[in-house]
Amino acid sequence: MKRLLLNTKVSKIYIISVIIITLLLLTSYFSYAMFTVTNEKNNAISIVTGTLDYKLEIDRKEGNTLTIPGETSIEFIVTLSNPNNRIARFNFYYLNEIPDNVTVGYITDCETNPLPEEIGVNLETSKSIGSSNKYKIMVENNSHNEVVIELGVSVGLDYNDLSLPSNGHLFKEYINEPNAPELDTNMIAVKYENNNWVKADISNANNDWYNYNEQKWANAVTVSSSTRESYKNASVGTIINMNDIETMWVWIPRYSYTIGSKDGTNYYGKQGNFLTTTPTQELPGEIDVKFVASGEKDRCSAKYKVGEEITSWYTPDAFTFGDEELSGIWVGKFETSSSDPSLEHGGGNTTELDPMIKPNVVSWRGNSIANIFNISLKMNDEGNRYGFSSNVDTHAMKSSEWGAVTYLTQSKYGKIGNTNYSGANKEVYQNKSDQYITGCSWGAPGGGTGYDFGCQYTYDININGTGASTTGNIYGIYDMVGCSHEFMMGNYNDITINSGFSSMPDAKYYDKYTSDDTVTACNGGLCKSYYLSEIAHWYNDFYATVNSDIPWIICGSNYYYPDGSIEPLTPGIFWYSTDKGTDDTHHDRASRIVIAP
């Protein structure tokens, strides 16, 4: 080690030059040279130089690169050691860019966490002389090609007043922006202006088409084939006639969530800026949400104590579709209606009609869940009336996808974050239309016997009407409380019973529950992101779990619930119950359609 004493009367230029030259010389090596600056008597300074190194070992392998074959997942142990004669700090990261369908993460007690792709994560780094830490790393290669991962380490002295280079990498600033909506070929972005839906400017998305910070979720429509080209070629601001609209959609961007607890025991969300009272089961608080890219997938407990640092997140299962990680999903803005809603039950038990998604029409009921599934699939068949391409997958809503909507609703980006509502009115309002008219609102949350049925407010009436949407304004999703019970593609142990299915469809099209106990319902574990247990009974909403006799899930309650017999349980967005999968008795089961881009 080398020591230089310099008097402060020497030219400042000379001192600065020495420091700069020293830094340039030292930082040119991979094992970084470091320096310290200390005050000494007689106004002199001391510059101490030396070299810090690290030792990185990968189990069963030499070197710091890993080759992962296509369609393979591996786990390995990395040992990071401090071989220096002084305390040092280490940051562990990987160097090269990797494809979107490859995930690198580290595994801790709270399952798998993403490893930042530039620099980053201080994984309880080695500091003591001679100390070492072990990390379990996971790589999932969902591509068909071989992928090479190169690991790296940046080294620095353990002093807070030093800021040193780290192999050209910088800490990545996290920007909580939603993934841009993925429009299919013939979908048209729309916004609401002067009491009309008009063509939106997608080139200036956050200011015109959508702004999730203002509970303005992205909306899009498809129109009739006879008007499609005209609207596609029309200028921004052109009114989209409701008679020409056939389907309406709302974008749910990929996110991760976590649920806070005031006391570390009862997890009812946080009070935040949106409640004046401590969150309870009757009036729960905000669910924390952060938007994430399609390559990020959190798998922690999704719980934390309010006031402490949030480190535990979970990415809803709704954003994993088969072997695809989605940037978001499109959800039908209203309950599904049919191409002939004048028929009995708005369409009845058939696959001969086409789905429509619009306000102020009768929802399609009386159908079996198998028929619902099949009519949703044919929406993107070749030559379909909507103009959908083969790049999207239209399907009947899964219970996990319903959950993704409900959790976002209970975040600052949803109705709870809308400052036009307070107290109990933060809950989504009920649709009490006994004629099953889509988009209606009672003007208040469901509760009490409430037998004044009807369509008190339409979806476009500010506050009293828009309070029935997931955002509290016209940009949200409607009919998720009341109107009709909605069949979900959520099933107990592949029991088809009276659903119309002879066998279950491909696994990506439904959620399977393996137990009638919500604590073990998802393959022996808790169903995170499904609303079945984490947020069960929030707002005092009713729930009943699936079993071998009634194996299908229905959500959202209907217009007449409750009937006064099971007070104080109420209808709500977290309401769910069970069904045999056919609607030949009550004729009050509807459905909702989702698009996976």
Image (spheres, rainbow, N blue to C red):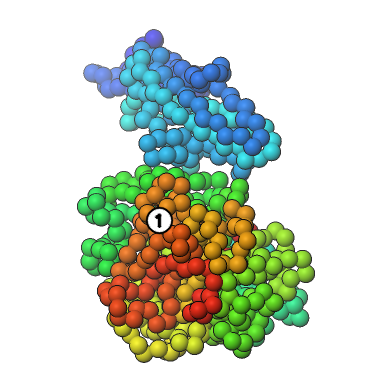
Give the quadrant of the C terminus: bottom right
Q: Is residue 457 left or right of 225 when viewed as pictured?
A: left
Relative to residue 279, is residue 363 depicted above or below? below
Q: Nearer the viewer, residue 283 or 185?
A: 283
Relative to residue 223, is residue 382 depicted above or below? above
Q: Is residue 534 left or right of 470 when viewed as pictured?
A: left
Residue 568, picture quadrant:
bottom left
Where residue 133 sits in the image (x, y, percent)? 39, 23
Where residue 434 sits in the image (x, y, percent)? 45, 87
Q: Report the amino acid beneath label 1.
A: Asp
Q: Is residue 45 left or right of 364 when viewed as pictured?
A: left
Q: Nearer the viewer, residue 567 or 439?
A: 567
| 10 Å crowding of disc 1: few (<14), some (14-19), many (20+) | some
Residue shown at 63%/61% (left/top)? 502
Give the quadrant of the N terminus: top left
Where residue 393 sits in the image (x, y, percent)? 65, 60
Give the total of numbered labels: 1
Q: Is residue 126 left or right of 568 when viewed as pictured?
A: right
Where residue 422 sits in the image (x, y, percent)? 30, 74
Residue 356, picture quadrant:
bottom right
Circle 1 residue: 516
Residue shown at 42%/39% (left/top)? 111
Residue shown at 39%/68% (left/top)? 575
